[in-house]
Amino acid sequence: MNNIKIFVADDVSEDGLRPLRAAGFTVDKRTGLKDAALHDAVRDCAGLIVRSETKVTPQVMEEAVKLRAIGRAGVGVDNIDVAEASKRGIIVMNAPDGNTMTTAEHTFALILALARRVPHGHVSLREGRWERKRFVGVELRGKTLGIVGLGRIGRVVANRARAFEMKVIAYDPFVSEEAARNMEIEIAPLEEVFAAADFITVHTPLTSETRGIIGAEAFKLMKPSVRIINCARGGLVDEAALYEAIKEGRVAGAALDVFEKEPPSPDHPLFTLDEVIATPHLGASTREAQEGVAVTVAEQMRDYFLTGAPRGAVNMPSISADELNKLQPYMQLAERLGKFHAQLTDDTVREVNILYAGDVAEMDAAPVTRAFIAGLLRDMSTRVNVVNALLIAEERGINVTASYKRVTSEKTPALQTTVTTIKGVGTVSGSLFGGETDGRIVEINGFGVEAIPRGNVLVMRNADVPGVIGQVGTSLGRRGVNISRFQLGRREPGGEAMAIIEIDEPLAVEALNELRAIEQVTDLRQINF
């Protein structure tokens, strides 16, 4: 595995990188690189690990021609162009749980510091003053905490708030009222959260929809005694609007750990206000969290390169190594069925449907669907893989659907794939044999067969009359081509037949044309796996 090189661009815990080195990977850690120096460093790396400092742009990915995985040692991935990575077939992983506790704790540290004016009192005392009356604070008990975004961190913050006897009201369009009730949280529209809260903390990703979610219009709805906390992402709070709101007495104070531009300028207007507390993006800065996220992303990247398990992936279904082990034989079979379909037709694909039956129907077969599409489109686009297969299908206007049939007979194929082109419909089915590891094709366009999808295969349709098999064997024998396996399927005697001929080496065009010239042969294609 020494041919796998991982470049670490930010200050990630050395102890956390041990899983990569133990696996025999080459780990190159150099921090603070920019532009040409960064491009040169990533050019030959298969994996890239960053925190929040390095921006993984399309230009970086363009230079990193061998890049297959990007790991974010933390939660947010807004410094990574995930859409571009997906198009290029690069998996993006993060450590979604690693910063949860430490960021929630830092949020509450800022809430308490803001409520009791701790930093102001500290500075005053260090300067030789004893100003007890100047720094009168407010209690948390009985106050309302408004939470914007009720994900992992937001929920931990809510739990801590209840311990301080605070009322919690939250906005999150993806959390049901029933789920919120179970957490003793009131769900409300965003405007109602703004109007009711004494403290407001934001815990959402930074997107085009959430940028500036707490801004000028929001401040107009709030109590003049409200205090704002942001430990999530710079840009969620409109800093210019916050400055004006505090100056005008419409907001009592704010505590910020993140900023629109990091590091912020020393003359940032908010730093001139006594009502503002600021820390330098410390939400995830504990020894435990730094090592934890590093270990998590290192193990995820190691497992991806060793087993293909996409744990922690943000741009494809994330599954455990155990789940992957169960799905792997089906994924391998699906990819080969896709390749088979692709070589059976020359027409433009319009629609794909996969019917899962038996054991695989009891699992989340999304990775199997991706594997099939990757196989189907592999010859159409060299950049296709399981990461970007569905994106490329969508780009080409291919509709992909999957369905599940849980009650089956033993004869029902595990995977029944149907590909609709501009000229017709083709079906290929496959199942696992030999202890659920040996994938085989069991049906092609209504013909029952049993073919092993590997090596070189001839698919022949012909009239079901005597002598055809002999002519094929004679033609191949004359050219010194050995037949390793011959399978014949037919619907009824004397009708049309289909032969699956497994051969030891691929045929040249002249040999294929000679077989096609046999009078009874109606179609013949060579499939290479």
Image (spheres, helix red, strand yellow):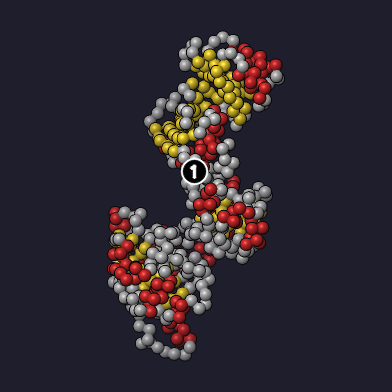
104 lies above or below 356: below
405 lies above or below 219: above
Q: Amino acid at mark 1?
A: Glu
Q: Name the residue rendered at 54%, 37% in the picture.
A: 377
* Residue 215: % across, % down: 38, 68
Q: Between residues 305 and 61, which one lies in front from this camera angle?
A: 61
The residue that label 1 is drawn on is 395
Q: Sort mark 1 into few (<14), some (14-19) or many (20+) by Cα contacts within 10 Å.
A: few
Q: Between residues 75 and 100, which one lies in front from this camera angle?
A: 75
Q: Name the residue rendered at 50%, 15% in the picture.
A: 496
* Residue 236: % across, % down: 42, 65
In the figure, is residue 2 to the left or right of 99? right
Q: Secondary structure at mark 1?
A: helix
In the figure, is residue 14 to the left or right of 408? right
How many numbered discs, if any? 1
* Residue 133: % across, % down: 36, 87
In the figure, is residue 28 to the left or right of 182? right
Q: Name the residue rendered at 52%, 27% in the picture.
A: 441
443 lies above or below 394: above
